[in-house]
Image (tube, helix red, strand yellow):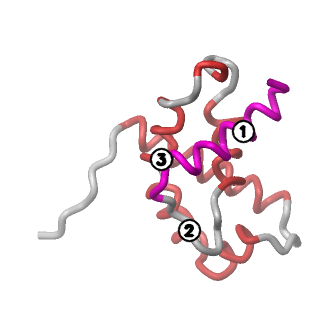
């Protein structure tokens, strides 16, 4: 029997939010030559859904471990997920394992967008 990864309800919602953030980039930047667009074009929609699911634990971790100066100052789906998508190195590391390193980039992006 095949073993399937088990995701929490929160992780499933995080994956949906991440995919929506990716889709928003793709729909708004159809002609842009960005790393995300190149991965999307090469791998396709189904692979991108799997990438968003694979990054769900990361997104939940980043949200749960947000620094105190960011606590309750941003929304997960409209601000954090786009910041995560922007921070990911799409060409070399589309499923980052170093949560703290990516978190530093995401939190800095959120601080700039919130003028902190």
Residue under label 3: 58
Q: Earlier in the sequence, mark 2 or mark 1?
A: 2
Q: Which residue is mark 2?
A: 93
Name the residue nearer the viewer: 88 or 105.
105
Vertically, is 9 above or below 84? above
Q: Residue 85, position in %: x, y?
A: 66, 53
Q: Which residue appears farthest toward the left when viewing the image?
A: 1
Quadrant in the picture for the N terminus? bottom left
Name the residue rendered at 79%, 70% in the picture.
34
Q: Residues within 10 Å of mark 3 (few under 14, many from 20)?
A: many
Q: Nearer the viewer, residue 42 or 88?
A: 88
How many marks the image carries: the answer is 3
Residue in the image at 70% along x and 46% along y: 82
73 above or below 96?
above
Whether tag 1 and tag 3 are in contact, CB under 8 A, the answer is: no
- Label 2, residues with CA under 10 Å away: few <14, some 14-19, many ≥20: few
N-term mark: 2 or 3: 3
Relative side of 75 to 34, left or right: left
In the image, the segment drawn in magenta is: 97-116
Q: Nearer the viewer, residue 107 or 94?
A: 107
Quarter placement of the C terminus: top right
- Residue 94 belongs to magenta span: no
- Name the secondary structure under disc 1: helix
Determine which of the numbered discs, if any, sits on residue 79 in the image.
Answer: none
């Amino acid at each position: 029997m095949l073993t399937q990864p088990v995701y929490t309800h929160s992780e499933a919602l995080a994956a949906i939010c991440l995919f929506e953030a990716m889709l928003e980039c793709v729909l708004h930047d159809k002609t842009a030559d960005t790393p995300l667009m190149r991965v999307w074009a090469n791998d396709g929609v189904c692979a991108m859904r799997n990438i968003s699911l694979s990054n769900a634990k990361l997104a939940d971790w980043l949200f749960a471990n947000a620094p105190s100066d960011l606590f309750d100052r941003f929304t997960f789906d409209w601000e954090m997920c786009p910041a995560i998508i922007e921070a990911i190195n799409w060409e070399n590391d589309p499923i980052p394992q170093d949560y703290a390193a990516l978190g530093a980039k995401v939190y800095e992006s959120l601080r700039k967008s919130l003028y902190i």
